[in-house]
Image (tube, helix red, strand yellow):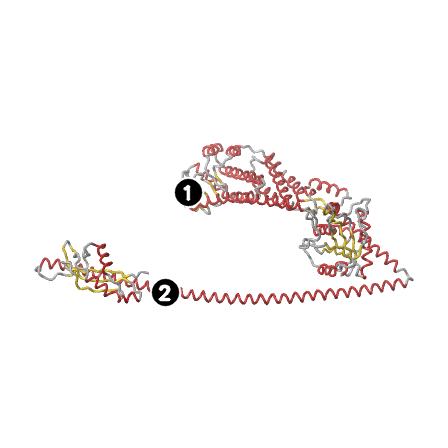
Amino acid sequence: MIILTLIAKMIACSVILYGYYWLLLRNKRFHHYNRYYLLAATGASIVLPFVKIPIFFEPGSTSGQIVYKSIDIISVNRWEDDVVESTKSNSLALLFTTQTAIFILYGIGVIILLYVLGRSLNYIRALSKKYSYEYINALKLYNTTEPGTPFSFFKSIFWNARLDLNSEEGKQIFRHELFHVKQRHSADILFLEFVSILLWFNPFFHLIKKEIKAIHEFLADQHSISGNNQHDYAELLIMQSIHVKKSTISNYFFQTHIKRRIAMITQIKNKKYNYWTRIMVLPLSLLLFCAIALYAKTPDRPRLTKQVHEIAPHKLSKPLTVLIDAGHGGEDAGAKNDDGLMEKDLALAIARQINLAATAYNINVVMTRNEDKYPSLKERSAMAMAANASLIISVHVSAAPKIQTSSGLNPNPANGFQLYITGKNQNTMDESKLLGQEIIKHITGFYKVDAIKQTSKSKVWMLDAVHCPAVLIECGYITNKEDVAFISKSENQKKIANSILQGIVDYNFGNMNRALEDTIPGNKHTRDSVRLKEDLLKQEITHRKLAEARAILHEQGTLLQKQQEIEMVQRKIAENQYLELQHEQKALVQKQRELEWQQRKMAETKYLEIQHEQKALTQEQREMELAQREIERADIIQDTLPADRPDPVFTKVEIEATYPGGSPAWQKYILQNLRYPAKAVKNNISGTVTVEFIVDKKGKISDINVTNGPDELRAEAARVIRQSGKWIPAQQNGQIVKAYRRQSIAFQLEK
């Protein structure tokens, strides 16, 4: 209900403020004023509904009465009910279901609009990443080829490369966009975007956002044409007006509103009319503030009628402290009816009305609870002791079980108010009875009340275990429809509250009269009796205070012991967690050390492999140089020496010696003839063996030498090479030559 009221006020504010703008300010040349007016109207529409200021006036004075009536007429707050405490469960369930549906619908709307805003921001972000920019002072200028450019966003201008920046048109458009940047127009749009997202159900915020965008263009146009021909600029707007892809949160030069923009450029000022339309905003704002924020209120006093409970109260000459105990609360709902109405809610509503009206009677009220919580009975009586309360009023609502008849269970007809006093506490019984009688007198004037009843078998703590007079009022039956209809209404709750307070005042006046009668001079027996009662009462109060103090100390001691036990358990849990954490840290350190060792090992292995590769490359380079020298020497020898000299052995040749049939034949030969050494199989040894040998001009193999590989595999590798037969000789410069050949053989065990 409160949310709906706030929404209604917000929409009312935006309707009035936007309506004034539409009628008197729209399409006028004071664009700066209109910009700040619309922004202020948005803020006022959001904030003003939350402001609620009561204005107190005495209806008796003529001037006060005029102001009071004026505010009461224009204020929308007079339609709000101050206290709405009791509703039936069916209505509550229906409201809950409706509220849930409304919140879901609201959430869907917010999500959709946030998605649209995010897409626009992402589009601008993509452009800023796609294109390069250059700084002009603190401004970023992006040179793009995107449709829809140029436009500005905060301190960035996205320019279109097809527009010459140095041309007259380009300069005017650049001044236009630069003005948007300097005036921080993007901040206005982003603010209104978030407002229209969070409060999307208010259509006037969307209209304000649209008008703000138009005003931004009017301002930028006004700046761009300063010193230029208005008609040339209008022609530029028409020529450049195209439909392009746009981001909703940017300031485009080619915005719509072309007709309005041209009208603003060529409009003639009317200073006198413009002045009055702007100045009239002040009385409008004052009137709106009074209507939304203020509400007239008179001091809470019972109205003068013929009924006893509404007669103007006899105000006490001295303040009197009274404890008002709203029964049950929190998880203890008290009595319930078939509609789900709970005793705790009705009792709290009546107690609050007593608290509101008590000031007029000069009564200081101490509430045991002012919200839906459950203080224990001992806590409630301790509150009375701590506040030094003179009286205690405990507010409840009764209930009666259904009656079994031949047609089934029927509602119990029991109805009316009931009032209980202690039947065990002799110290307060008499005074409690007098208090109850005074209260009954006032309630009887408007509702049925039974005679005073005393507690007998069951102990009622707030009557039997307190230090001062106390009464418990059962305000009707929650199981009776007539009683529920009566006590659920706010005006009837006020009647009950005023009757109780008037009864307290009358009881206090009666005590004063009795005290005067008991202190008549010469009546020594009466004075002695009064003094005796006072002494007994003081002793009883002292005794009860000591008992209460002992009970509180006992409870505190028990709580302290439990707290120590809890702290001990928490320390043990913390110690166990600490030990577990230490163990985990040690395991983590160990794993980290193992990982570092493995990394070092891998690094060393990699280093050795690199060194080996470097040595092999160096050796290969040396062999190539040696082969080259041998080739040169062979050429010389071939030219100068006889043909019967020994053939040179080449280490590097153009075409190496190959196995007949090539690589497939060699693999087939290896598969058929290679035998895995038993020792290597036993020790699970694998690896690659490199064998170096010489192939002469006839293809014969000689000088077999195993250069590397596991020792267990070398002999087998040499045997396979030795028995491989003739090879195809190597060639150098088209001649068959004698040359070295290296052959690698891989040994791999199957897993």
Front disc: 2 or 1: 2
Instruction: Tell me the distance, in whole angstroms, between the alpha carbons under discs 2 and 1.
Output: 52 Å
Question: To which residue does mark 1 refer?
Answer: 143
Q: Position of residue 169 (x, y in %)?
A: 44, 36
**Closest to the observer, 644 or 663:** 663
Q: Quadrant of residue 527?
A: bottom right
Asked if residue 639 can be seen in this view, the reply is: yes
538 or 728: nearer the viewer = 728
Q: Which quarter of the rendered picture does the N terminus lie within?
A: top right
Q: Position of residue 281 (x, y in %)?
A: 63, 39
Identify the residue at horizontal 10%, vertical 61% (top origin). Answer: 645
For the C terminus, the quadrant is bottom left
Is residue 37 visible in the rendered structure shown here? no
* Disc 2: which residue: 600
**Amino acid under label 2?**
Arg
Amino acid at circle 1? Asn
Examine the image and state in which quarter residue 28 appears: top right
722 lies above or below 231: below
**Against 423, is 290 above or below?**
above
Q: Is residue 355 above or below residue 31?
A: below
Q: Is 121 positioned to the left or the right of 488 in the image? A: left
The residue carrying pointer 1 sits among few (fewer than 14), some (14 to 19) or many (20 or more) residues within 10 Å by Cα, namely many
The tag earlier along the polypeptide, 2 or 1, is 1
Numbered tag placed on residue 159 in the rendering: none
From the top left corner, tell me how far across and down residue 524 is, in percent: 90, 63
Element assignment for label 1: strand
